[in-house]
Amino acid sequence: MRKNIVAGNWKMNLTFQEAEDLIDEIANGLDEENLKCEVVVCPPAPYLEIASDYADVSRLRAGAQNVSEYEKGAYTGEISAMMLASIELEYCIVGHSERRRYFRETNGQIARKIDRLLDYSIHPIFCCGEVLEEREQNRQFDVVKQQIEESLFHLTSEEFSNIVIAYEPVWAIGTGKTATPAQAQEMHAFIRKLIAGKYGEEAARETSILYGGSCNASNAKELFANPDVDGGLIGGASLKKDEFLKITMSF
Ligand code: 13P
C-alpha cells in the first residue's frame, strides 16, 4: 500500500551506546499525533534488536541495511532474512549503490535478496539510480529501467505489492548535491510508468517511491511536495536527531 515513508540509513556509523541513544531520542521525539509518514530507522546489524524493541512500543519502525541472498548454512558473516524476521524487522534496504559499488552486487543478486525477504514478509526498500557519468550521457532512464527490470520484474503482482522503491542518484549521495525537485519528480514519474507497464496502473499508483541523496531538513519539504515523491531515504541527516525529526514532519 502506498504511504509516505522517511527511512534513515545509518550506514556504518555509531557505537552501541550512541545507537541506543539516537533510537530512543527519535522514538520519543516523534510527533505521533501529526505524523503523516511511516518512520523507519536502519541501523547497523548489531543494533537492530534495539530498534525492533522500540518498534513494539512506538511509531518507529525498524529495518536492516542488507540481507544475504542465501537462505541459511555455511555462509560466514552473512545475515539471513529468517534472522531479520525473527527479530520482527519490517523493512530491509537492498541494492544500495554502496553495495553495488564496493561489494560488486549485481541486479541478479539483488533479485535473490528480494526473494529471500519476501519469503519472510519483510518489505524490501529497493535502491536504484545512475552514476554521474550516466546522467551526463543522458542514460539515467535506461540504467534505472534495467536495474528495476532485472531485480524486480520477476515478481508476481502480489509479491511486487510489498516493494518500496528508493531512487538514489549516486552523484547526489553524500555529496551535498541534491537532485532538483524537478529531476526527482521526472525520474519518479518514469519509474511509476514502468511499473504501470508491467503490473498495471493500480499497482503503480500504490507503490511508494522514495528519494535519496543529500536529502535534509532544508530541502525535504520541496522534494516531498512532488506528486510522485513519497518520502526519502536519508543518509547523513538521519544521524542527527533534530534534523531527522524535522524531515519526518516535511509532508
Ligand atoms: P546521504 O543522505 O548522506 O546523501 O545518503 C543517502 C543515502 O545513501 C541513503 O541511503
Image (spheres, helix red, strand yellow):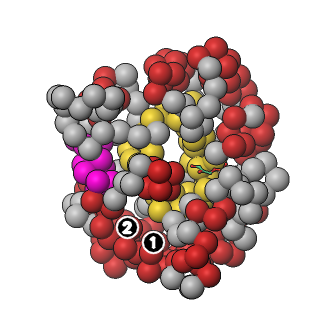
**Label 2 residue near ligand 1, CB within 8 Å:** no
**Image quadrant where residue 154 sits:** bottom left
The residue sitting at 37% across, 73% down in the picture is 146
Q: Residue at x 47, y 62 (%)?
A: 128
> Which residue bears the numbered disc 2?
148
Name the residue carrying label 1.
144
Magenta stretch in the rendered image: 109-119
Picture layout, residue 18 above or below residue 169: above
Tell which residue pokes out farthest to the bottom in this image.
137
Figure quadrant of residue 183: bottom right
Q: Is residue 110 magenta?
A: yes
Q: Circle 2 sits in a helix, a strand or a loop, which is it?
A: helix
The answer to whether residue 41 shows anywhere in this view is no
> What type is the residue that disc 2 sits on?
Ile
Q: Amino acid at mark 1?
A: Val
What separation in Å lies between label 2 and label 1 (alpha carbons)? 6 Å
Outermost residue toward the top in this view: 17
Instruction: Identify the residue shown where x is 57% and y is 34%.
Output: 12
> In the drawing, what numbered circle is on residue 232?
none
Considering only vertical position in the picture, is 134 above or below 222?
below
